[in-house]
Image (cartoon, rainbow, N blue to C red):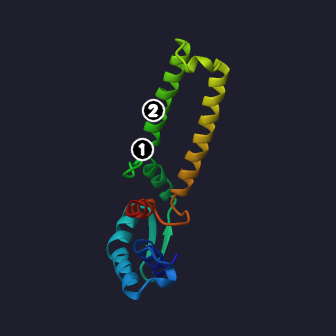
Amino acid sequence: MDLGEIARQVAAWENRVTVDDVSYDQRRNVHTALRQTHLPHMERAGLIEYDSRETTVELTDDAEAFDIYMDIVNRGRTVPWSEFYVGLGVLFSLFIGFHWVGLVPFSLVPALGWAATISLLLIVIGVVHIHISRKLQLGSDGPPPEIVLSAEHDK
């Protein structure tokens, strides 16, 4: 991808405007930061190949390993999926324990009903997890997660 296109898109995300509404100064500031700081760091890390003469940027095969890193990094206000699933396991265990000792209202639902409910919830949560993970992959369309979280925080 051309560095100018990348700078224009990042400037649009940062300034919450469309790509067509990015000013020359906004694009230039991002272009300079990318060229002088971010691209050299990402190239040294093996995530991209940057051709300064052609001003093109290309993801390397090693960039896929970065997706794995991003999946386990705490993203501010979000709960890591591993902690979410542990909490879910504890919650489901409590429901089953309450059913087992006959605590109302948990004892009013038959064991097969709890099994079906837990299974359905796990399927729905798994689908949501897949959807969110795909949105956060490198190269996906739309602004990066930190821009989205920042915009939501500003509301």
- Where is residue 87, by image quadrant? top left
- The residue type indicated by label 1 comes to Val
Return the x and y of residue 17 as percentages of the image width and height.
46, 77
- Where is residue 108, by image quadrant? top right
Q: Which residue is mark 1?
A: 79
Identify the secondary structure beneath mark 2. Answer: helix
* Front residue (pair 3, 81): 81
* Front residue (pair 139, 135): 135
Q: Is residue 105 left or right of residue 4?
A: right
* Front residue (pair 93, 126): 93
Mark nearer the N terminus (2 vs 1): 1
Return the x and y of residue 152 as percentages of the image width and height.
43, 60
Q: Residue at x 48, y 53 (%)?
A: 67
Q: Residue at x 46, y 81 (%)?
A: 4
Vertical arrangement, residue 37 with respect to residue 148, above or below: below
Return the x and y of residue 42 as percentages of the image width and height.
39, 65
Vertical arrangement, residue 125 with respect to residue 146, above or below: above
* Front residue (pair 52, 6): 6
- The residue type indicated by label 2 comes to Gly
Query: As drawn, which residue projects farthest toward the bottom?
Result: 24
Callout 2 touching callout 1 (CB < 8 Å): yes
Q: Residue at x 39, y 60 (%)?
A: 153
Where does the C terminus fall, quadrant-wise?
A: bottom left
Q: Is residue 19 left or right of residue 111?
A: left
Specify few, some or many for label 1: CA neighbours under 10 Å numbering under 14, 14-19, or 20 or more: few
Q: Which residue is mark 2?
A: 87
Identify the secondary structure beneath mark 1. Answer: loop
Query: As drawn, which residue projects farthest toward the front?
Result: 104
